Image (spheres, rainbow, N blue to C red):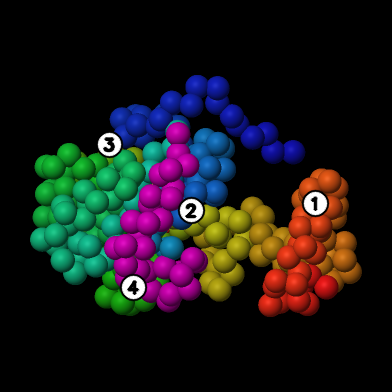
């Protein structure tokens, strides 16, 4: 039996609280892309909801996350934000809004904040320090993302564990130092060896949130559709599915089809009715107008 935590005081999680968790407790983060799931996640008291650009894969069926558009990410951010009373909402900035166009990063980040995000997430890339400095200077809280950065996976040899050799590990450590000096409030570590994420987590004041980075991070994040067992096209080693929504969906759809075909759906209690008097009156009036109508078959 899983006890679902419901807090009576549903105060909004703040950036300060996330930062303060370092060394005190674990941070939980899940991705989410729509109103209904966001409501359920918010009610289950997850600390952070990330409107991840994994939306490209699990919702839009695209192969690469860097193909998702700004409008798509903004619309889903709005839908998620509408449902939230408690969790901190972080929106992934899509590739096109800051990597393709670093000069426009502030313009687009402000759009995500207006759409209801409390912060934005930025993946490491060459001009990442300039972009992050500009956003933070303009009071936009930034979560950074290093290690395997899916938007530029093609530059990293594909979807591979990063930091497995000394040069690559040193490169990630250099990036972390820069990010900490810029003032990001949290850093996602994706697909790096646990020894490296432990070293990083122990060396900095900023909370780390791991995905495929072992258990020593300050927190953990997973893609919601992986957790629910809904997206099965690719299942990385680090995923743990806590449900089988794909199977449940197929079972529900099959039962619905059976019930429709056998006449068991809809039942009387799932239908509406008109009161007898009204029905009779309507018929009487229809019959009267029968001769005037061109469509005689309906009134026959
Ligand atoms: O978009 C996403 O889902 C992410 C997580 C994997 C951290 O960036």
| Residue hosting label 3 | 205
At 55% from the left and 59% from the top, the residue drawn is 225
Badge 4 element: helix
| Residue hosting label 1 | 281
**In this view, the mark in front (4 or 3):** 4
The crowd level at tag 4 (other Cα within 10 Å; few <14, some 14-19, many 20+) is: some
Marks 1 and 4, how far apart at CA = 59 Å
**In this view, the mark in front (2 or 1):** 1
**In this view, the mark in front (2 or 4):** 2
| Residue hosting label 2 | 34
At 53% from the left and 72% from the top, the residue drawn is 234
Q: First in sequence, mark 4 or 3: give its number.
A: 4
At 33% from the left and 56% from the top, the residue drawn is 74
Task: Give the percent coordinates (x, y) of residue 119.
Answer: 29, 44
Region of the chain picked out in magenta, as a range = 56-85
Task: Give the percent coordinates (x, y) of residue 204.
Answer: 27, 40
């Amino acid at each position: 039996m899983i006890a679902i935590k419901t807090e009576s005081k549903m105060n909004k999680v703040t950036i300060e609280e996330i930062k303060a968790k370092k060394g005190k407790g674990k941070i939980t983060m899940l991705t989410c892309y729509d109103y209904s799931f966001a409501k359920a996640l918010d009610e289950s008291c997850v600390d952070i909801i990330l409107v991840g650009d994994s939306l490209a894969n699990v919702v839009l069926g695209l192969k690469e996350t860097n193909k998702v558009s700004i409008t798509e990410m903004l619309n889903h951010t709005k839908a998620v934000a509408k449902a939230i009373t408690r969790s901190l909402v972080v929106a992934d900035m899509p590739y096109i809004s800051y990597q393709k166009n670093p000069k426009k990063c502030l313009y687009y980040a402000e759009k995500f904040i207006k759409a209801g995000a409390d912060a934005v997430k930025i993946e490491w890339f060459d001009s990442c320090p300039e972009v992050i400095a500009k956003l933070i200077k303009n009071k936009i809280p930034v979560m950074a993302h290093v290690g395997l950065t899916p938007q530029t996976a093609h530059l990293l040899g594909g979807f591979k564990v990063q930091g497995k050799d000394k040069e690559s590990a040193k490169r990630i450590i250099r990036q972390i130092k820069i990010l900490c000096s810029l003032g990001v409030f949290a850093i996602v570590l994706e697909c790096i060896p646990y020894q490296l994420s432990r070293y990083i987590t122990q060396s900095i004041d900023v909370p780390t949130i791991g995905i495929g980075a072992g258990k020593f991070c300050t927190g953990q994040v997973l893609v919601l559709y992986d957790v629910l067992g809904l997206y099965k096209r690719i299942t990385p080693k680090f995923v743990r599915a806590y449900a089988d929504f794909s199977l449940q969906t197929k079972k529900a759809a099959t039962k619905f089809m059976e019930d429709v075909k056998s006449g068991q759906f809809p039942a009387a209690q799932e239908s509406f009715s008109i009161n007898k008097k009204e029905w009779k009156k309507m018929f009487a009036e229809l019959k009267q107008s029968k001769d005037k109508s061109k469509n005689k078959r309906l009134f026959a």
